[in-house]
Image (spheres, rainbow, N blue to C red):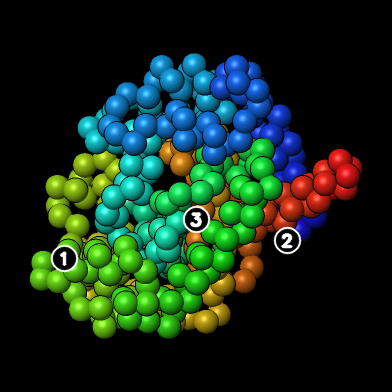
């Protein structure tokens, strides 16, 4: 954690925290939390979100040219939120409030030719409680506490995969998904084998439609349909204890999804891969800085 990294993160937090009160929902109703706005305006069904997106002023915050408010088949900027409420394609851990999964699309894309793409996980909110758009936006103390919990849950998921614990110890969503497979997977199966099984079970049609699924190894070869190769990759990466979990988010100008999602990559010590360094922000640093800001505000108000 360098001084420059902290300065840049503070600058991003200042930028986006200042933008948050300007969205029309806050102007109309008095400044409200991310949770308030999310629960009121983000639809759970498939529908065009363009008008609401612009009326709220979210287009001033989420500015990625790859973000689509219109429906592109079953996909748009709320696809991740919808999928978080149902059965995920590759789920590895869950609690009552959170789901840890491997994302669709091309996991590990930001790692370039780095050999740990299989380690790419995400955590999303899937139950009641605080729910946010992005951690660089202003957060209430309760939302910041929720961020700390999500970080802890993600690290527990990584530990479970490293220890290859049985599915029965990985949460209700994992157990439910295992029972729904054809044939059903026993809850005594290790989570590594189940992760590989879910990846190989993604059908050709789903791999090709938006957002699709591609999993490349360090040789830039897509191994997603080869269950044995996927299994070897999972074993090699998650058994390597010299790798550490790097938790991060993309800033709003890079995001294509409106539901907050923390990414995790297993990496060796040393400089970050360039695309990761350029497009992601250390979320543990954000959490630390938010805690400091809430403490200062509490002391000032008190």
Number of the label disc, if any, that sits on residue 263: 3
Tell me the quarter of the picture where residue 14 sits.
top right
Q: Which residue is mark 1?
A: 181
In this rendering, which labeled residue sits more in front, label 1 or label 3? 1
Q: Badge 2: how crowded within 10 Å, few (<14), some, or many (20+)?
A: few
Relative to 233, say whether 224 is above or below: above
- Residue 121: image x %, image y %? 43, 60
Separation of marks 3 and 2 at Cα, in angstroms: 18 Å
Q: Which residue is mark 2?
A: 1
Relative to 55, say whether 91 is above or below: below
Q: Earlier in the sequence, mark 2 or mark 1?
A: 2
- Residue 135: image x %, image y %? 60, 45
Q: Residue at x 51, y 44 (%)?
A: 131
| Residue 230 placement, left or right of 185 | right
Q: Residue at x 78, y 47 (%)?
A: 293
Viewer-proximal residue, 239 or 157? 157
Q: Residue at x 45, y 70 (%)?
A: 157
Question: From this viewpoint, is residue 226 visible?
Answer: no
Q: Earlier in the sequence, mark 3 or mark 2?
A: 2
In this rendering, which labeled residue sits more in front, label 2 or label 1? 1
Question: From this viewpoint, is residue 251 visible?
Answer: yes
């Amino acid at each position: 954690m360098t001084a420059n990294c902290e300065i840049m993160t503070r600058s991003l937090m200042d930028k986006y925290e200042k933008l948050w009160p300007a969205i029309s929902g806050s102007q109309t109703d008095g400044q409200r939390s991310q949770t308030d706005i999310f629960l009121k305006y983000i639809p759970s069904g498939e529908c065009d979100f363009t008008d609401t997106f612009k009326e709220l002023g979210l287009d001033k915050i989420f500015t990625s040219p790859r973000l689509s408010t219109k429906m592109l088949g079953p996909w748009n900027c709320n696809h991740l939120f919808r999928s978080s409420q149902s059965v995920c394609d590759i789920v590895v851990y869950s609690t009552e409030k959170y789901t840890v999964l491997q994302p669709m699309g091309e996991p590990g894309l930001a790692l370039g030719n780095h050999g740990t793409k299989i380690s790419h996980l995400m955590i999303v909110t899937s139950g009641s409680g605080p729910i946010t758009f992005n951690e660089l936006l202003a957060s209430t103390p309760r939302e910041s506490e929720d961020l700390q919990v999500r970080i802890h849950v993600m690290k527990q998921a990584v530990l479970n995969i490293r220890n290859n614990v049985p599915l029965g110890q990985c949460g209700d969503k994992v157990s439910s998904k295992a029972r729904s497979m054809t044939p059903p997977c026993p809850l005594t199966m290790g989570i590594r084998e189940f992760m590989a099984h879910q990846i190989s079970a993604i059908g050709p049609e789903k791999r090709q439609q938006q957002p699709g699924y591609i999993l490349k190894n360090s040789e830039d070869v897509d191994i997603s349909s080869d269950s044995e190769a996927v299994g070897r990759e999972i074993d090699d990466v998650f058994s390597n204890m010299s790798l550490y979990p790097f938790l991060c988010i993309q800033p709003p100008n890079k995001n294509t999804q409106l539901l907050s999602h923390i990414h995790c990559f297993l990496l060796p010590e040393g400089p970050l891969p360039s695309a990761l360094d350029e497009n992601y922000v250390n979320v543990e640093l954000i959490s630390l800085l938010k805690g400091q800001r809430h403490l200062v505000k509490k002391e000032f108000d008190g």
